[in-house]
Amino acid sequence: MSVRIAGTASYLPRHRMTATEISALSGIPEDVIVERFGLSGKHIAPPGEHVTDMAAKAGAQVLAETGTDPADVDAVVYFGSTWKDHAVWQAAPRIAHLLGTHRAFALELDYVSCGTPVAFRVCRDLMVAEPHLRRVLAVAASRESYLLDYTNNRSRFAFNFGDGAAAALLTRDGGVAELLESEMITDGSFSHQVRVPAGGSVEPASEHTVRNGRHLIDVSDPASMKEGLDRVSLPNFVRVAEGALKRSGLGLHDVAQLCVLHMKRSMHDGLLAALGLPADRALYLDDTGHMSGVDPLLALDRAARTGRLNPDDIVLLLAAGTGYTWAATALRWNRRGPVGVNR
């Protein structure tokens, strides 16, 4: 039983923060932001626009472009940032309400930056296990630019965090692509490295935590994290990529397009070399930065809309998220023409 992508969509807030502005706030030279961070700028949501609003906008677009009645959606799955409108709160039910998908149940996946391939794996398995599910809407958004303290050099790896959303409608018939297999690796030894220190049961939020910036992203030991990730990250990216492809009866030589999360330029180039892929087979999101679980789906939407994909192309969605989990999903593109039209 196959599961297909009927269409994809993405949403980016209008306001952009430039590399010049990031440089002024952080004290990092602009050429370093552009060349080493791989960031020309990023989109920033206005204060009143939250992850549910952005996810609903992307979701509404894909429903409209595929000609899907919201009442025909069976499930709404949110897989975006875990920093949402409220604490100890699910975003998926509100997104479903905003979209008018009143018959759908809501499901929430807390998988941070590895969200896209993980969500596709979960949604595909869910639809295979429950044949009565015909249409599943997967949505993600991130607003983590608001969690940054540009004066905290320990968290500089996160200075590329921007805001935006993406969505995909999964179906059983037609569509623009077929979802294939996935692979994941988790290394929990990194679980305490990146976090917002205050706000959980270990350190409840208070006026003291806000005054001292404990409610913003921090890295406990940047040198240790870098040393550890430098040792395992590239091998784990390759392992999950090869694993997803092998499960699909494919290999790295079959990949026509890589849709990967935003990372610093040297890491991106090193990943392409490790996978044996030329630069023109991967989109680099230097104009958006990193948006938690959104990136690979945004890249897929861009690749489709700009005509980069041809029938039978194998697309690899690849990501990693703090915690630390590496994940990959493969898909086979089915058609020419713009994405989002269900025929």
Image (cartoon, helix red, strand yellow):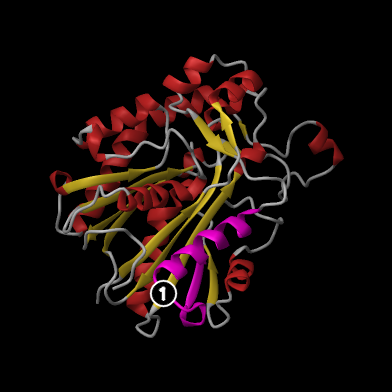
Using the rendered image of the protein, determine whether residue 78 is visible from the camera's viewpoint. Answer: no
**Measured along the vertical axis of the image, is residue 256 above or below residue 235?**
below
Magenta span? 50-79
Closest to the observer, 12 or 25: 12
Disc 1 marks a residue whose amino acid type is Gly
Q: Nearer the viewer, residue 143 or 46?
A: 46
- Secondary structure found at label 1: loop
The x and y percentages for residue 59 are 50, 64
The answer to whether 11 appears left or right of 144 in the picture is left
Q: Residue at x 14, y 58 (%)?
A: 249
- Residue at position x 58%, y 46% in the image: 13
Left/right of residue 274 with respect to residue 192 in the rendered view: left
Q: Residue at x 50, y 25 (%)?
A: 224
* Magenta stretch contains residue 57: yes
Q: Is residue 136 left or right of residue 339?
A: right
Q: How many marks?
A: 1
* Spot occupied by residue 291 in the image (x, y as percentages of width and height): 51, 44
Q: Residue 262 is drawn in which quadrant?
A: top left
> Which residue is more in the foreground, 221 or 305?
305
Mark 1 burial class by Cα count in 10 Å: few <14, some 14-19, many 20+: some
Q: Where is residue 129 drawn, in percent x and y?
A: 35, 78
Name above or below for residue 68 compared with residue 340: below
Instruction: Name the residue that disc number 1 marks.
Output: 67
Residue 195: percent from left, percent from top: 61, 40
